Amino acid sequence: MKDELFKELVASVREGGAILRGQVAPSRKFVIDRSNVKRIRTNYKLSQRQFAKLLGISPATLQNWEQGRRLPKGAARVLLQVAAKHPDAVWDVVRPLQSATKPKASNGRHKIKQMARAN
């Protein structure tokens, strides 16, 4: 490794340590609070059970997120961000291949039943 790259790496590790110790503020932060999770679900017009099935998580996990007992992390947090900003992309992925029409947002139960049959 070149000296310049190594020095940059060391500086980055030191900065990360300072952020973890609270000495320096991070340059960016991603937060999804419980109201956002509930708002995302209600925008899909799905029950907790239906939305949990859509995301591939348990209803209890979704309830914990919505009630603030736990926060989504990692891939779940990213999936919720995608679900919030690009609902059509989510439906394109979960919609059965045999369905040629785009599902309507108001018919959540029908979409979940279609998903279950496709899997």
Image: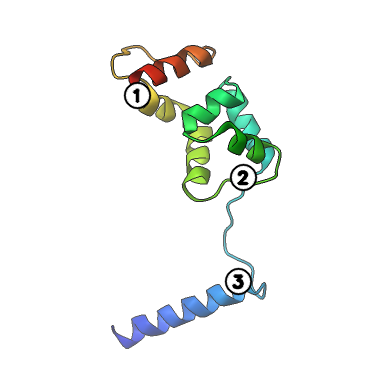
Q: Residue at x 65, y 46 (%)?
A: 70
- Please provide percent x and percent y for residue 113: 44, 15
Whether pointer 1 and pointer 2 mark residues with C-beta atoms closer than 8 Å, the reply is no
| Residue found at x 69% / y 45% | 69
Amino acid of disc 3:
Ile
Mark sitting on residue 53: none
Q: Which residue was labeled with disc 1?
A: 119
Report the amino acid beneath label 1: Asn
Which color scheme does this rendered protein use? rainbow
The local secondary structure at tag 1 comes to loop
Q: Amino acid at mark 2?
A: Ile
Question: Does 31 appear above or below 5?
Answer: above
Task: Specify the quadrant of the image occupied by residue 97.
Answer: top left
Of residues 72 and 21, the one nearer the viewer is 72
Spot occupied by residue 39 in the image (x, y as percentages of width and height): 64, 30
x 28%, y 83%: residue: 1
Q: CA distance from mark 1 to mark 3?
A: 44 Å
| Residue 23: % across, % down | 66, 76
Q: Is residue 34 above or below residue 110?
A: below
User: Of helix, strand and loop, which one carries label 3?
Assistant: helix
In front: mark 1 or mark 3? 1
**Which of the two residues, 53 or 100, is positioned nearer the viewer here?**
53
The answer to whether the residue labelled 2 contacts the one labelled 3, judged by CB atoms less than 8 Å apart, is no
Write down the residue under mark 3: 19
Q: Secondary structure at mark 2?
A: loop
Image quadrant for the C terminus? Answer: top left
Give the residue pinned by disc 2. 32
- Mark closest to the chain's N terminus, 1 or 2: 2
Kindly report the distance in space between the C-alpha atoms of the residues bearing marks 2 and 3.
20 Å
